[in-house]
Image (spheres, helix red, strand yellow):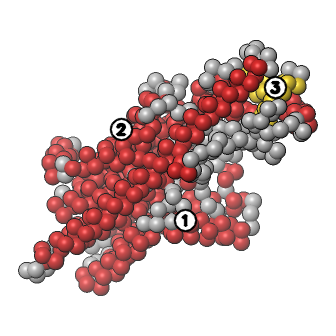
């Protein structure tokens, strides 16, 4: 541990800009979240029924989320505290990941560019926005992400020959991280593979079969950590729900169980193509070129150095390049963007590696003069990529923020309409027909998954439409209405068939004890 403290002190002295870069990257991407209150989807559920939400997390093996909520007094949602702590923890993730690679490089001064660029590319990646706009779990998932980085660090120390205690710590941290969000499993894999590649790059004169033994230890640590996570999850659900409990949240997302092989292959090919080509804002078109340049350099070094066990290095690089698709392969189709936790890590690693490659010393007297312009140009390109990612992330967060503001205004307008109808009693049931999307300026018109969709659009195809989401959203804003029952909703659809759509006059009506709000004809 004394050696570790010394490494940390040296890292901070030699990479003084890295913490500031991490803080700036997190602020650029998520600073909008601190500018005002935002209650997103599921947050309304947390605010009026936190106990039910905690039980639902236990039922899908996200026990770490519940433990962290209780530990930090966050059981009752506080959006400002969640967002502030999330930004702080993401900043720590960036700093620690840079230190992690610096440490396994043996403290090489040639890693300065890597340590500066990696967290910039990681923390600004728009993919993470889809996860962290879920305010109710933003801090806790970020902390579990940090736990997975620490797990990879500890397991790698043991894999590279340190005492078994490091491996044990890695296994425990894995069980903690995976218990916060299952999509962090491939994130951990990407981190462990990145460490393996860095260690191989900087440590040449190892004993025969060292890197094979190291790889096997990495695998053993991962299997132990995953097994412990599964056992804890089963023990928790057994204690809370009994031996007959069978969860279907995650299992229901596996397309292999219901679709044909041809269908699954088609979905996977489509998803992989979208990621590689950067088909939308949340998948920047940087991962594929960064990975390709890394592969070309790998082939060049292979032909030039002929290092022993280089095949293991190549296989680790291939596994890291495939890590963004592990969940896709497992489920048999494309995955939700908020589940894509490893793509930002892999893209950042391959991109930051370019900064190291062009600045690493060459043989010959003119090496320095050849490298300086190339290193400066590469760093500039990577910084531009990072800032571009950060502004895209910030725009997505702003879209979510402005969508919430529009939803709040809609809720107040509905409440005013109800008062004009003479409805003001607490507990009045409300049936919301169809769905409503507020008019938004083009600059905040991103609409994908968790971003850009009104609360009055969520679950519109459910048995009671958006009524549960909408009524819950109104309740947390002090408007005491309840959702209509399924039977009442069916009658409301018939009653409201001839009504005009919101916000036209007559788009609200009273059907007995139930208020009808008709958003659309759907």
Answer yes or no: is residue 488 visible: yes
| Relative side of 306 to 240, left or right | left
As drawn, 114 above or below 28? below
Name the residue at the bottom extreme.
303
Q: Nearer the viewer, residue 497 or 337?
A: 497
Q: Residue at x 61, y 23 (%)?
A: 477
For mark 1, what is the residue? 279
> Label 3: few (<14), some or many (≥20) within 10 Å?
many
Q: Residue at x 53, y 33 (%)?
A: 38
Name the residue at the top extreme.
425
As drawn, 254 above or below 372? above
> Label 1: few (<14), some or many (≥20) within 10 Å?
few
Q: Quadrant of residue 416?
A: top right
Give the alpha-carbon distance from disc 3 to disc 1, as whole Å: 43 Å
For mark 3, what is the residue? 515
Q: Quadrant of residue 159?
A: bottom left
As drawn, 255 above or below 405? below
> Label 2: few (<14), some or many (≥20) within 10 Å?
some
For mark 2, what is the residue? 88
Q: Which mark identifies residue 348? A: none
Q: Residue at x 47, y 49 (%)?
A: 395
Give the alpha-carbon distance from disc 3 to disc 2, as whole Å: 44 Å
Q: Earlier in the sequence, mark 3 or mark 1?
A: 1
Q: Secondary structure at mark 2?
A: helix
Coordinates of residue 452 in the picture (x, y in percent) = 59, 46
Q: Nearer the viewer, residue 77 or 141?
A: 77
Q: Secondary structure at mark 1?
A: loop
Q: Nearer the viewer, residue 219 or 336?
A: 336
């Amino acid at each position: 541990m004394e050696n570790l403290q010394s490494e940390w002190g040296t890292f901070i002295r030699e990479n003084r800009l890295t913490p500031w870069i991490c803080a700036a990257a997190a602020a650029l991407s998520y600073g909008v979240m601190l500018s005002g209150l935002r209650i997103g989807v599921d947050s309304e559920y947390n605010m009026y029924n936190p106990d039910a939400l905690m039980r639902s997390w236990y039922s899908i093996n996200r026990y770490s989320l519940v433990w962290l909520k209780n530990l930090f007094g966050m059981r009752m949602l506080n959006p400002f505290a969640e967002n502030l702590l999330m930004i702080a923890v993401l900043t720590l993730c960036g700093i620690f990941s840079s230190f992690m690679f610096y440490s396994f490089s043996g403290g090489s001064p040639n890693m300065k560019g890597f340590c500066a660029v990696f967290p910039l590319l990681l923390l600004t990646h728009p993919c993470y926005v889809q996860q962290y706009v879920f305010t109710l779990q933003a801090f806790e998932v970020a902390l579990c992400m940090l736990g997975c980085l620490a797990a990879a660090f500890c397991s790698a120390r043991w894999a590279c020959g340190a005492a078994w205690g490091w491996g044990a710590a890695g296994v425990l941290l894995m069980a903690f991280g995976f218990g916060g969000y299952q999509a962090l499993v491939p994130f951990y894999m990407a981190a462990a593979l990145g460490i393996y590649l860095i260690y191989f790059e900087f440590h040449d004169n190892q004993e025969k079969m060292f890197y094979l033994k190291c790889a096997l230890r990495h695998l053993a640590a991962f299997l132990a950590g995953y097994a412990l996570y599964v056992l804890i999850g089963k023990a928790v659900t057994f204690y809370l729900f009994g031996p007959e409990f069978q969860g279907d949240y995650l299992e229901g997302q596996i397309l292999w169980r219901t679709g044909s092989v041809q269908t699954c292959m088609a979905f996977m090919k489509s998803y992989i193509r979208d990621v590689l080509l950067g088909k939308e804002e949340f998948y920047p078109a940087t991962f594929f070129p960064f990975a390709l340049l890394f592969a070309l350099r790998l082939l060049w070094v292979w032909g030039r150095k002929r290092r022993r066990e280089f095949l293991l290095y190549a296989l680790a690089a291939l596994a890291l390049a495939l890590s963004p698709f592990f969940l896709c392969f497992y489920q048999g189709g494309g995955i939700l963007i908020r589940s894509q936790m490893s793509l930002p890590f892999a893209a950042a690693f391959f991109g930051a590696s370019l900064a190291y490659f062009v600045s690493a010393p060459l043989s010959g007297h003119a090496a320095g003069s050849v490298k300086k312009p190339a290193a400066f140009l590469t760093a500039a390109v990577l910084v531009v990529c990072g800032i571009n990612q950060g502004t895209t992330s910030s725009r997505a967060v702003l879209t979510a923020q402005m969508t919430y503001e529009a939803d709040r205004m809609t809720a107040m307008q509905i409440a005013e309409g109800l008062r004009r109808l003479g409805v003001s009693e607490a507990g009045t049931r409300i049936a919301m027909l169809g769905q409503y999307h507020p008019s938004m300026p083009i600059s905040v018109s991103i609409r994908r998954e968790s971003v850009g969709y009104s609360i009055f659009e969520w679950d519109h195809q459910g048995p009671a439409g958006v009524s549960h989401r909408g009524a819950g959203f109104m309740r947390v804003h002090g408007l005491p209405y309840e959702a209509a029952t399924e039977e009442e909703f069916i009658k409301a659809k018939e009653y409201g068939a001839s009504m005009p759509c919101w916000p036209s006059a007559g788009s609200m009506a009273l059907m007995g004890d139930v208020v009808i709000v008709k958003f659309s004809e759907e």
